């Protein structure tokens, strides 16, 4: 009887747990884990003294400063506009909403080099935006603002796509409840809506920041890449590689990796926090 | 707070949900809005709360025009069907919310709020849940918290949308009598929406029966049960058997049916419909009867004979088993109507005499009880 029961146990869609898990682990190892470990070994293998020397060299520090500054500013901008866009996409019905929603994914799909070229030609002194801006004394291309714009472009969907589903799931009755209890619109937003979307929003911002720090393709076209001024860290790693300084490149890449992992950790902590409220349903 | 509603209309797009509502609710009354889904009862409640606005009509509360007042200034307590508790706040913070968001000048001190919340928690019998999050509570507990949150602002009007809809039967019965005591102690005017007849009649002082955006009848349980004002109410109250009859000298006449127990009514001669509850129709064995018992099922105490009539009608009635010896499949019977309501088919707009109602068109079927 037990045998018969075991035989009619419903089959899962994928064949065999062991096989599918094995394939997944192999894939993750080859594509993600092994390259990262190789990078760590190579970066750490040069010895502490040289490691510190490379990290603390003016050019590296400048590149990191430019990268982190630009990424931080880009993230703040994305945090604001990403939230706004998610809000517009979830809260209003209007013509072309589906189109706008689809357009949010363009930065995901577009080759970043194409984005870089497009932005550069727009903001160059001969471009549509660049001319008037330059006349007003604002230099975008080959300066920090250009880097920030390129980073913003490629990373804003992370914020939108993180906040959007949470906003959609938010029970409209929560806002109505706040209203009947006497809350002003601002109190309703700050005390009811914001806390509910905060973990997802901050999570989206952290991933967006991680993406900005690693952005290469879009930035190199618009940045001008002057060492110490507009040279970003991932470009410096690339330059070191072209100089056959494989170790130097690894060290810089390793620092970027540590930043990225830290940001991912933060993002996951936010997600765990968000899950706590959802437990038990609404 | 006395609420006066006059000629309230509301449409969503082309769909007219409220087609001219008039009600006067007295101060301190407990009112149930009862009706099938789609009858507009929730929309009416939301308009009173200020969450929806009518297209036309009046809503006056103690003489003040509430349509000129925003929801947050009406000082109402609204309990949502699915409670709508703030998921990131503890029970304590949920209940305190309405006091915390007041402007600084009106806001009570922190200690006062804390004491007030504690009093409410004790009143609701849930002080041990004060520091839980809503996600960690059962349905009945959430319901209590939602009510506590609404009561904290000392509402002048308490509105509840299907307050027990999402709870299981035992918890429902428990909370029902408890809600009645909450209403009596708080002294507020209370209106709640339900599709459950028992709930409405047991709890409310008066019941408002709504169907398709209109008020069909307002009254107490007995009034509505004995004198349904329209075919809709009769059906809604369980009169599922509709016999076509002829009115002749104030009596309803139908072949094979004994209607002598129904009082004579001052109705004009002509066709009419007699609405009867299955338990109010007795099949009496009669060799010359025009009706036939098709089959009989028994639940022990109650028999459910299925009867077929001379014109092909078929329906089931209910009768106590010990009151109906010899009722078997194939037996011929005469039907005796114990009580029922007659409605004549007068054209719309011409409401007739007692117990007469118009508009037989577009009447929805009774909603299935869940």
Image (cartoon, grey):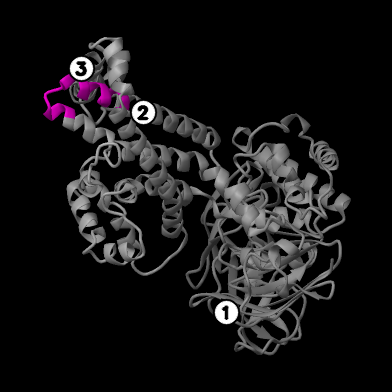
Of marks 2 and 3, which one's residue comes earlier in the chain?
3
Question: Is residue A247 rendered magenta in the image?
Answer: yes
Q: Nearer the viewer, residue A68 or B217?
A: A68
Mark 1 vs mark 3: same chain?
Answer: no
Query: Residue at point 26% right, 9% down?
Result: A47
Question: Would you say the residues marked 2 and 3 are in contact, meaning their CB atoms lie under 8 Å apart?
Answer: no
Looking at the image, residue B206 lies above or below residue B328: below
Q: Splitting the image into 4 quarters, where does residue A101 fall?
A: bottom left
Query: What span is in magenta?
Result: A240-256
Q: Please state the horizontal and vertical placement of residue A171, each as a whole percent of the image.
A: 54, 51
In the picture, measured across the screen, residue A239 lies left or right of residue A4, that is left
Q: Which residue is mark 3?
A: A38
- For the residues labelled 1 and 2, the Cα–Cα distance comes to 74 Å
Question: Would you say the residues marked 1 and 3 are in contact, meaning their CB atoms lie under 8 Å apart?
Answer: no
Q: Please state the horizontal and vertical placement of residue A16, each as a whole percent of the image.
A: 22, 21
- Which disc number belongs to residue B360? 1
Question: Is residue A159 rendered magenta in the image?
Answer: no
| Residue A61 is at least partly visible in this image | yes
Tell us which disc is closer to us: 1 or 2. 2
- Which disc number belongs to residue A259? 2
Looking at the image, residue A105 lies above or below residue B222: above
In the picture, measured across the screen, residue B188 lies left or right of residue B265, that is right
- Which disc number belongs to residue A201? none
Looking at the image, residue B171 lies above or below residue B320: above
Mark 1 vs mark 2: same chain?
Answer: no
């Amino acid at each position: 009887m037990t045998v018969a029961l075991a035989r009619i146990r419903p089959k899962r869609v994928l064949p065999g747990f062991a096989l599918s898990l094995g394939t997944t682990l192999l894939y993750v190892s080859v594509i993600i884990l092994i390259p990262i470990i190789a990078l760590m070994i190579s970066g750490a293998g040069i010895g502490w003294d040289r490691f510190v020397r490379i990290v603390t060299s003016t050019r590296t520090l400048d590149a990191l400063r430019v990268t982190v500054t630009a990424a931080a500013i880009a993230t703040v901008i994305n945090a604001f506009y990403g939230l706004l866009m998610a809000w517009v996409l979830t809260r209003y019905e209007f013509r072309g909403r589906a189109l706008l929603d689809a357009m949010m994914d363009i930065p995901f799909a577009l080759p970043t080099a194409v984005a870089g070229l497009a932005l550069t030609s727009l903001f160059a002194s001969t471009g549509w935006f660049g001319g008037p801006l330059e006349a007003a004394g604002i230099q975008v291309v080959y300066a920090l603002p250009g880097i920030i714009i390129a980073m913003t472009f490629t990373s804003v969907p992370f914020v939108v796509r993180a906040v959007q589903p949470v906003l959609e799931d938010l029970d409209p009755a929560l806002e109505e409840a706040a209203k009947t209890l006497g809350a002003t619109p601002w109190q309703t937003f700050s005390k009811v809506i914001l806390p509910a979307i905060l973990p997802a929003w901050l999570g989206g911002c952290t991933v967006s920041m991680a993406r900005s720090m690693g952005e290469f393709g879009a930035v190199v076209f618009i940045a001008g890449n002057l060492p110490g001024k507009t040279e970003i860290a991932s470009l410096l790693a690339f330059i070191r590689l072209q100089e056959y300084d494989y170790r130097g490149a690894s060290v810089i890449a390793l620092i970027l990796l540590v930043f990225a992992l830290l940001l991912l950790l933060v993002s996951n902590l936010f997600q765990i926090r968000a899950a706590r409220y959802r437990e038990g349903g609404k | 707070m006395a609420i006066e509603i006059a000629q309230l209309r509301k449409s969503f797009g082309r769909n007219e949900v409220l087609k001219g509502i008039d009600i006067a609710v007295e101060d301190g009354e407990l009112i149930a809005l009862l009706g099938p889904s789609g009858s507009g009862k929730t929309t009416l409640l939301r308009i009173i709360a200020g969450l929806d606005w009518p297209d036309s009509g009046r809503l006056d509360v103690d003489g003040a025009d509430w349509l000129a007042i925003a929801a947050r200034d009406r000082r109402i307590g609204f309990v949502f069907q699915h409670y709508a508790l703030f998921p990131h706040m503890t029970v304590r913070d949920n209940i305190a919310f309405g006091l915390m968001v007041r402007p600084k000048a009106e806001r009570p001190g922190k200690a006062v709020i804390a004491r007030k919340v504690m009093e409410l928690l004790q009143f609701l019998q849930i002080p041990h849940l004060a520091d839980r999050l809503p996600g960690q509570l059962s349905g009945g507990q959430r319901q209590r918290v939602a009510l506590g949150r609404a009561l904290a602002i000392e509402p002048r009007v308490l509105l509840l949308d299907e307050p027990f809809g999402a709870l299981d039967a035992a918890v429902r019965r428990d909370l029902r009598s408890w809600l009645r005591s909450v209403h009596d102690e708080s002294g507020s005017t209370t209106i709640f929406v339900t599709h459950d007849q028992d709930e409405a009649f047991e709890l409310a002082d008066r019941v408002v029966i709504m169907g398709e955006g209109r008020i069909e009848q307002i009254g107490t349980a007995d009034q509505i049960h004995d004198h349904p004002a329209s075919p809709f109410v009769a059906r809604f109250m369980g009169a599922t058997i509709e016999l076509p009859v002829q009115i002749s000298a104030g009596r309803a006449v139908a072949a094979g049916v004994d209607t002598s127990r129904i009082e004579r009514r001052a109705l004009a001669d002509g066709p009419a419909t007699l609405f009867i509850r299955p338990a109010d129709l007795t099949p009496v064995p009669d060799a010359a009867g025009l009706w036939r018992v098709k089959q009989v099922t028994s639940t022990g105490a109650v028999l459910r004979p299925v009867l077929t009539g001379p014109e092909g009608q078929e329906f089931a009635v209910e009768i106590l088993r010990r009151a109906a010896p010899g009722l078997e499949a194939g037996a011929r019977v005469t039907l005796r109507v114990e009580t029922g309501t007659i409605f004549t088919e007068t054209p719309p707009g011409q409401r007739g005499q007692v117990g007469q109602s118009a508009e037989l068109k577009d009447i929805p079927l009774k909603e299935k009880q869940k």
